[in-house]
Image (cartoon, helix red, strand yellow):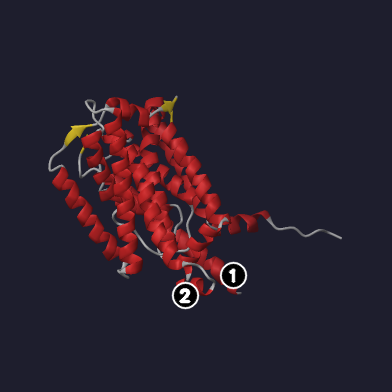
Amino acid sequence: MKQIGARPGVNLRRLLKSDYGPSLILVLIIVLLGVYTYAQNAHVLTAYNLSQTLILVAATAFASFGQLMVILTGGIDLSVGPLMGLLLVIASFFLNDDKSAFVALFGFVLMALAAVVTGLVNGLFVRVGRFNAVAATLVTYVGLQGISLILRPFQGGYISSAIANAIGLSAGFLPLAFVVAAILAIILEYCLRTTRWGLNLRAAGSREQAAHQLGVPVNRTVFLAYVACSACTFLGGIMLVAQIGVGDPNQGVSYTLSSVAVVVLGGASLFGGRGSFIGALLGAILVQQILDATTFLNLSEAWQYWFQGAFLLVAATLYTRARGAAGRARRA
């Protein structure tokens, strides 16, 4: 009797319609864009540029991992960017060349405390106060930005070069921070698929009422997601300290948009319940690659936004159609 097996084409279509489909698409786009950019300007693959690019990727990736946790629950955190700016401002008072190691350590503790308090406030607004996630985190956004501007009305407070170098430590062209981000993405992805924590996140964002009936502690899950988001943003803030090297309250704001763009490119649904940390890491790589490509291709800054917008539009369309087809197939 002839054994009937699954056709390769069918398996590929299933994979593309799964949560890992966007990751495969991102890998393809990253490779094609890299090849084209290298063909136009070989300097894009110098060790120095690769190292600096991957450090920037790490900062975006850390913030995006936190954003993804919140988006998986069906929420959003608009305060990610201003929080990174506030962390940079706090660092500018404590991580200076003329400060002792104890003062620097206290600065890191204060940064971590600011991040945790921000997450707690967002969680309280959303789950206890029952505010809409956009409105709640927008309030936090404004508050954090205001605090940063009060502390540092103007740019100032240079970061110790020794601390900046330690944060940006690399092995060849590979920064340690990027390695940490990649390992964290793998660990979080594993936990998302195999642990109660991951199941609770996806259940809370898929159908909250059904999650309650299944015994999922939705309030606690969502609350802790906001705290975890701010904790991941703390890691991104540390990277920002090394990149910018001076207290500037306006430097972190753009990370709100970047973190959302990255998780959407990685295949997350803004309605909650679906996403991938591996996809978020690849999305961070693509976003930074786009910024690099416009520079090496001698394009204006406007192209950075046009490329990101185009990729987001195409990605959202492809992912929605693929998942819609998958849903119709299951119902049939």
Where does residue 165 sit, x and y in percent of width and height? 34, 27
Instruction: Look at the image and tell me in which quarter the C terminus lies.
Output: bottom right
Quarter that holds the N terminus: bottom right
Contact (CB < 8 A) between labels 1 and 2? no
Along the line of sight, the residue nearer the viewer: 285 or 127:
127
Q: Relative to 321, is 82 on the left or the right?
A: left
**Residue placed furthest toward the front:** 102
**In the picture, residue 120 is in which quadrant?**
bottom left
Q: Which residue is mark 2?
A: 209
- Mark before the other along the chain sequence, 1 or 2: 2
Three-letter amino acid code at disc 2?
Answer: Gln
Q: Residues within 10 Å of mark 2 (few under 14, many from 20)?
A: few
Q: Which residue is tagged 1?
A: 329
The residue tagged with tag 1: helix, strand or loop?
helix
Spatial CA span between label 1 and label 2: 25 Å
Label of residue 276 in the image: none
The image quadrant that residue 102 belongs to is top left
Position in image of residue 247 (x %, y %) = 21, 37
